[in-house]
Image (spheres, rainbow, N blue to C red):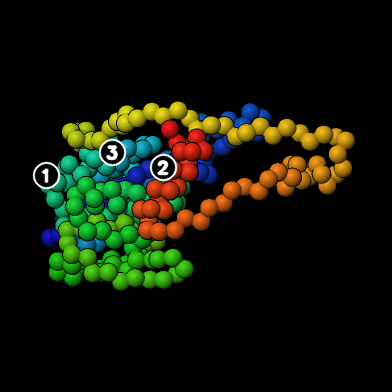
Amino acid sequence: MMRVAALVQAAWDPVSVEVDPVSGAIDRARAAAAASPGSLEAVELALTLGEAHVVGLDGPDVEALLRDCLALGAASVVAATDVYAVAEAMAADPFDLVLVPHRSGDHGASPVAGLLAGLLDLPQATAAESVAVEGREARVVSRLDRGVREELAVPLPAVVAVEPGIVRPRAASPAALIGARSAVVPRLPPAVRAPGPAFLDHRPPRPGPPRMPAPAGTLPAEARIAAVVGAATEARQRELVTGSADEVARRIVELLEAAGYLG
């Protein structure tokens, strides 16, 4: 049986987050966590394709989400601090297919699939609206801009980012939900080689914009407008730069340095 990993994330339900009408502060007193778009669809697809193992990235109440995945039928669940910890664990114990939500909590495109595929050096497909496995190959239909669809043949193992609505997630039985409530959710150890921020250089801030004196009130309206928009001053110097890409880039840098924008 094919081993399939599904990554899930929990996010705050935007309907449950309120804003104080007087102070404008965000009130999270009644905020509720929910599965991010595409998370439960990834789990459902993993259950359909083979033996499902669910990994939850840290977020609000992610352990409750993982217990729900156990109730749905996942073979195992585990929580992780970040994608780097997931990549190290999957490099040591590889899967045939890794399913990741294509959308983040704000319904924008998530970088998790691309980052995980790069760390594992695996082929990837994003915005998947259909996934079918044929032998050691995944047939993926991806959604592109302007409604265009693209059919891909992705060799396994691979990382596929699925769109919300690719399948309808099943509902867990009440008995399964109650049984999973007491389950202990293990955690992956932090990544050994997780990259951290490195100080490279410090440069002085670019000069501020020049202060423009207000035109004299004794001038006529046309003259004041011309002074504000710069029509009354001398024409700016313009230069048409030609040559190769390297020559044009070099000249642009020279002009920026001469103007004081680069240190």
- The number of numbered badges drawn on the structure is 3
Q: Is residue 151 left or right of residue 165?
A: left
Where residue 100 appears, as percent x and y from the top left, is 30, 53
First in sequence: mark 2 or mark 1? 2
The kind of residue tagged 1 is Ala
Task: Please state which of residues 52 and 146 is positioned toward the viewer in this rendering.
Answer: 146
In percent of width and height, residue 8 lies at 31, 47
Cα separation between marks 2 and 1:
29 Å
Vertical side of 213 occupied by 14: above or below: below
Residue where numbered disc 3 is placed: 82
Identify the residue shown where x is 41% and y is 29%: 203
Could you tell me the amino acid type at mark 2?
Ala
Whether 1 is drawn above or below 33: the answer is below
Q: Quadrant of the N terminus?
A: bottom left
Q: Judge the density around disc 2: few (<14), some (14-19), many (≥20) Cα neighbours within 10 Å.
A: some
Between 149 and 130, the residue placed more toward the observer is 149
Is residue 54 at all visible to an observer of this figure?
no
Q: Is residue 134 visible?
A: yes
User: What residue lies at 53% left-to-right and 53% top-to-bottom?
Assistant: 239
Tell me the residue that label 1 is attached to: 92
Kind of element beneath mark 3: loop
Question: If you read the primary sequence from the N terminus, does the residue marked by circle 1 or circle 3 appear first?
Answer: 3
Q: Tell me which residue sits at (41%, 42%) in the image.
A: 11
Distance between the alpha carbons at the discs numbered 3 and 2: 15 Å
* Residue visible at 32% across and 69% down in the picture: 141
Residue wearing tag 2: 11
Q: Which element is circle 1 on?
A: helix
Identity, as a three-letter code, of the amino acid under mark 3: Asp
